[in-house]
Amino acid sequence: MILLRFVIPDRDRRTGQFTGLMSAAYDLLRAGDMPQAEEDELRRHVEWVETNVPVPARFARKRNVSHKQTHGISWVKADAVDLVSRFRAIAGIAERHGLVVELLQTDRPGYIVHEDAWQVVAEPFHGD
């Protein structure tokens, strides 16, 4: 199974990994400094994702308090065509606002803690 991750090459302080595209989209919306039509377009794509893609109940393998630093990373299934299309549209808007968006691809995301029709959430393997 091929998995994709749209990222901004800034490190997320919770995970130590690159920041995911949805976090960047929320930041752009909060900033409120884009033309209204573009903001509406971005909001439509974000709301589609929020409505159609479930929020995983778990982002870590262990529930132990000592493992609170452990946090899974969301990966999009390459065959989730509608979601990939939305992410590409969000990436285009982000790039027009000066963000660099990279597309990562893997078939080994780490220890899987959640999977649904759209995505996989996995804790990266040690050293990844």
Image (tube, grey):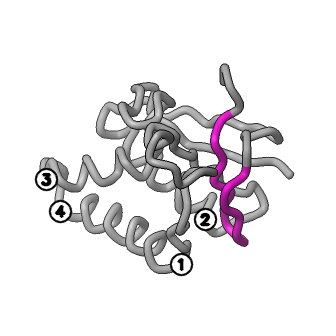
For the magenta stretch, what is the residue range?
112-124
Across and down, in percent, residue 77 comes to 73, 57
Q: Which residue is mark 2?
A: 83
Looking at the image, which residue is at 50% across and 69% down?
Answer: 55
Nearer to the camera, 20 or 34: 20
Which type of secondary structure does the marked residue at label 4 adopt?
A: helix
**Vertical side of 67 occupied by 83: above or below:** below
Which type of secondary structure does the marked residue at label 1 adopt?
A: helix
Q: Which residue is mark 4?
A: 36
Q: Residues within 10 Å of mark 4 (few under 14, many from 20)?
A: few
Looking at the image, which residue is at 28% across and 59% down?
Answer: 38
Q: Amino acid at mark 2?
A: Leu
Asked if disc 1 and disc 2 are in contact, CB closer than 8 Å, the reply is yes
N-term-proximal mark, 2 vs 3: 3
Q: Residues within 10 Å of mark 2 (few under 14, many from 20)?
A: many
Q: Which residue is mark 3?
A: 32
Which type of secondary structure does the marked residue at label 2 adopt?
A: helix
Mark linked to residue 62: none
Nearer to the camera, 95 or 2: 2
Q: Which residue is mark 1?
A: 52
Which type of secondary structure does the marked residue at label 3 adopt?
A: loop
- Using the rendered view, name the quadrant where residue 109 is placed: top right
Q: Amino acid at mark 4?
A: Gln
Please identify the residue farthest to the right as the structure is shown. 1
N-term-proximal mark, 4 vs 1: 4
**Vertical side of 53 occupied by 71: above or below:** above
